[in-house]
Amino acid sequence: MNPSHPQPKIQLSQTPEYREIYSNSVQVRVSVWDFQLVFGLAHQDTAEQVNVNNALGVYLSPQQAKALWNILGQNLAQYEQTFGTLALEPQQMSKGPVH
């Protein structure tokens, strides 16, 4: 860090539109300009069909997507160190959207 350019103080606030949701499904869509994360709630009513109700879409620049990847990786490593290794179910290991 350059001492002649100290880091600015960051102040967080929430807009009136801010909301929180629970999601057990996320789909990733990629274009040349951005990444879109679509969060939803997946539920399986029958053995033959899983329904996903999408609730929120978030667009990220490629740079922010990489920063998110890094911070999620760090936090997952810390989580697993504390609580044990997370295992994904076999159907989640296939290519395509992660549910």
Image (cartoon, helix red, strand yellow):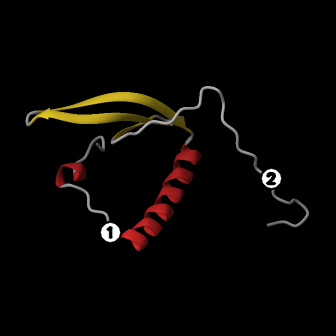
Say what amino acid the circle numbered 1 marks: Thr
- x and y, in percent, of residue 62 in the image: 54, 44
Q: How many marks?
A: 2
> The C terminus appears in which quarter of the rendering?
top left
Residue furthest right in the image: 4
Residue at the image position 50 percent from the left and 34 percent from the top = 58
> The N terminus appears in which quarter of the rendering?
bottom right
Residue at the image position 23 percent from the left and 53 percent from the top = 93
Q: Determine whether the residue tagged by mark 2 lies in a helix, strand or loop.
A: loop
Residue picked out by circle 1 = 85
Image position of 33 (left or right of 4): left
Q: How many neighbours does mark 1 have within 10 angstroms: few (below 14), some (14-19), or many (20 or more)?
A: few
Q: Is residue 84 above or below residue 58?
A: below
- x and y, in percent, of residue 36 in the image: 46, 35
| Foreground pick, 20 / 60 | 20
Say what amino acid the circle numbered 2 marks: Lys
Q: Quadrant of residue 52?
A: top left
Residue at the image position 70 percent from the left and 39 percent from the top = 13
- x and y, in percent, of residue 61 in the image: 57, 40
Residue furthest left in the image: 47
Q: Determine whether the residue tagged by mark 1 lies in a helix, strand or loop.
A: loop
Q: Quadrant of residue 7?
A: bottom right
Q: Earlier in the sequence, mark 1 or mark 2?
A: 2
Residue picked out by circle 2 = 9
